[in-house]
Image (spheres, grey):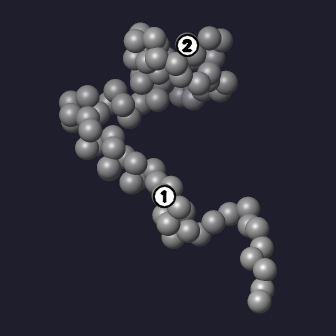
Amino acid sequence: MRKKRWRFWAWPWELKQAGVLGINARNLNYIAHLNPRKLYARVDDKARTKLICHEHEIAVPRTYAADQSVWRHHWLWFIDR
């Protein structure tokens, strides 16, 4: 009988069996399903969601790096917080 070796990676079907959601499944089953379409932009944008959480005193992880593209300048607000 061969001993099962530990691997650094897992096949997609192994992750699914373990209950790990892929990003598309998460978006389809939780984000889109539980949020009205008009509010989707709020929950789909990480920086915007973080702002909303801060406004409601919900703890969020610290941001150490940010996307600095032209249309995402509001991310820079979190770097020194």
Identity of the amino acid at label 2?
A: Trp
- The image shows residue 12 at horizontal and vertical percentages of 53, 67
- Quarter of the figure with the C terminus: top right
Where 66 sits versus 76, above or below? below
Relative to residue 33, is residue 55 drawn left or right? right
- Disc 1 and disc 2: Cα gap in Å? 35 Å
Marks counted in the figure total: 2
The answer to whether any part of residue 18 appears in the image is: yes
Where 58 sits versus 6, above or below? above
Between residue 55 and residue 6, name the one nearer to us: 6
The residue tagged with tag 1: helix, strand or loop?
Answer: loop
- The image shows residue 62 at horizontal and vertical percentages of 62, 21
Identity of the amino acid at label 1?
A: Gly
Between residue 38 and residue 69, name the one nearer to us: 38
The residue tagged with tag 2: helix, strand or loop?
Answer: helix
Ranked by sequence position, the earlier of labels 1 and 2 is 1
Question: Which residue is found at the position 59% from the left and 24% from the top?
Answer: 61
**Residue that lies at the very extreme toward the bottom in this rendered image:** 1
Q: Which mark is residue 77?
A: 2
Q: Determine which residue is flagged by label 1.
A: 19
- The image shows residue 42 at horizontal and vertical percentages of 34, 27
The answer to whether any part of residue 12 appears in the image is: no
Between residue 9 and residue 1, name the one nearer to us: 1
- Which of discs 1 and 2 lies nearer the camera? The answer is 1
Relative to residue 4, is residue 35 drawn left or right? left
Relative to residue 3, is residue 10 drawn left or right? left
Question: Which residue is found at the position 36% from the left and 31% from the top?
Answer: 43
Give neighbour class at mark 1: few <14, some 14-19, many 20+ (Cα, 10 Å). few
